[in-house]
Image (cartoon, rainbow, N blue to C red):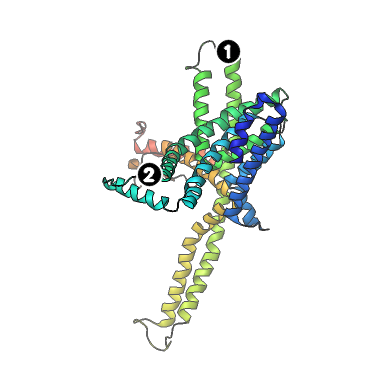
């Protein structure tokens, strides 16, 4: 609420810069309070351990808390307020609908639930009170516009705020620290947020259409097009993993998977042995027609093998917990990698006993060199399968 009203009064800055800046400060102090409360309610009191710190680092509320503090320390920039205002507006609506109105009118929640059930059944027999209508309208409005608002805020953060701080740094109106800090924030949002990735795609599609051939106007200077392409490619390079980094991270994840197999196997073996050893069975008598020591020993080994099979999944899960941001970037790049694999692998129908399909899923690829080697093997398999008549792929 402080953020919304502070921004509203800051918009009246022509009436006095000193007063307007005071409201700007109060708006961001309201944002800091809001995010601090949300983080405290989510995680509780601070804990001095790496697991707690890691959970904080990958939480978007912590990211926006740090960003709000950074903007508070900077010279006032009105464009930076809009994302916080939009988030705060929906928070205010949700808090009013779910907490304030039910506190004053206790029967509103049941009243709305009854009317919604009647609407689903097609037999609306009762109306809503004034408080019920207000609460229902808030809920419907929030559900309808929340996702579109997030999409537009993502575009605003990428296009408007990004361009504003770059222009400010070039003209020495904002500190040179602002662009690196903000683009690191966007890089984290790109890795963790689907709306932010969609916003980057929208902005890039619009700029490509306006500034690059063949859709660009003939009046656009070649220097502008070349400069845009260089900046675009540079941002793509720093915002995403390159292929060498991808393969290195893939190796790290596989190492976690292999390391996870050993303790899980030992746990399964020891757990199975402890359970079977505690069974009241006479070792001198046959059990289920088999020697008890042989049966229980084999069962313990089976538990160990089962733990060994589950271990890679446990190791991958641990990797995701310890490296959440990196894991999400790796997943995003891996999806792109498998698109390349699917597009370039040979047709499985060409396989035979003398011409087996090499590495269908590209699991053995560990570098760009091995990827090129994989491509050559796919083409060789294709030539053998078609008797050198050419590719069957469309």
Query: Outermost residue toward the top?
Result: 219
Q: Residue at x 57, y 18 (%)?
A: 225
For label 1, the residue is 221
Location of residue 190 (image quadrant): top right
Q: Nearer the viewer, mark 2 or mark 1?
A: 1
For label 2, the residue is 355
Secondary structure beneath dot 2 equals loop
Q: x and y percent of residue 2 in the render?
A: 61, 40
- Which sits in the foreground, 159 or 291? 159
Q: Which quarter of the image is occupied by the N terminus? A: top right
* Residue 130 seen in this snapshot: yes
* Residue 372 seen in this snapshot: no
What is the crowding at mark 2: few (fewer than 14 residues within 10 Å), some, or many (at least 20)?
few
Q: Which quarter of the image is occupied by the C terminus? A: top left
**Mark closest to the chain's N terminus, 2 or 1:** 1
Label 2 to label 1: alpha-carbon separation? 54 Å
The correct choice, above or below, for 135 with respect to 236 in the image is below
Location of residue 134 (image quadrant): top left
């Amino acid at each position: 609420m402080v953020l919304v009203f502070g921004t509203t009064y800051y918009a009246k800055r022509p009436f006095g810069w000193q007063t307007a800046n005071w409201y700007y400060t109060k708006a961001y102090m309201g944002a800091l309070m809001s995010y601090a409360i949300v983080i405290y309610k989510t995680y509780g009191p601070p804990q001095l351990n790496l697991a707690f710190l890691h959970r904080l680092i990958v939480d978007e509320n912590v990211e926006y808390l740090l960003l709000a503090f950074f903007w508070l320390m900077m010279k006032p920039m009105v464009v930076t307020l809009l994302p916080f205002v939009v988030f705060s507006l929906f928070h205010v609506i949700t808090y009013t609908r779910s907490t304030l109105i039910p506190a004053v009118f206790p029967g509103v929640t049941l009243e709305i639930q009854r009317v919604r059930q009647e609407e689903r059944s097609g037999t609306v027999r009762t109306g809503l009170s004034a408080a019920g209508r207000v609460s229902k309208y808030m809920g419907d409005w929030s559900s309808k516009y929340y996702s579109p608002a997030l999409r537009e805020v993502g575009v605003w953060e990428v296009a408007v705020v990004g361009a504003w701080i770059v222009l400010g740094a070039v003209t020495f109106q904002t500190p040179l620290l602002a662009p690196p800090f903000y683009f690191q924030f966007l890089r984290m949002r790109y890795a963790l947020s689907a709306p932010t990735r969609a916003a980057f795609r929208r902005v890039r599609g619009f700029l490509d259409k306006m500034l690059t051939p063949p859709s660009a106007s003939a009046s656009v200077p070649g220097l502008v097009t070349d400069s845009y392409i260089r900046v675009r490619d540079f941002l793509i390079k720093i915002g995403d993993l390159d292929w060498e980094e991808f393969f290195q991270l893939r190796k790290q994840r596989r190492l976690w998977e292999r390391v996870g197999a050993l303790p899980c196997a030992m746990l399964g073996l020891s757990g199975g042995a402890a359970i079977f050893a505690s069974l009241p069975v006479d070792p001198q008598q046959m059990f289920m027609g088999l020697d008890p020591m042989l049966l229980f020993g084999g069962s313990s080994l089976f538990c160990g093998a089962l733990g060994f099979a589950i271990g890679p999944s446990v190791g991958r899960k641990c990797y995701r917990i310890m490296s959440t941001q990196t894991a999400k970037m790796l997943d995003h790049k891996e999806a792109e990698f498998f698109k390349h694999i699917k597009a370039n692998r040979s047709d499985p129908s060409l396989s035979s006993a003398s011409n087996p399909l090499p590495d269908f899923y590209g699991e053995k690829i560990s570098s760009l060199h091995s990827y090129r080697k994989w491509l050559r093997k796919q083409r060789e398999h294709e030539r053998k399968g078609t008797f050198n008549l050419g590719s069957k792929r469309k």
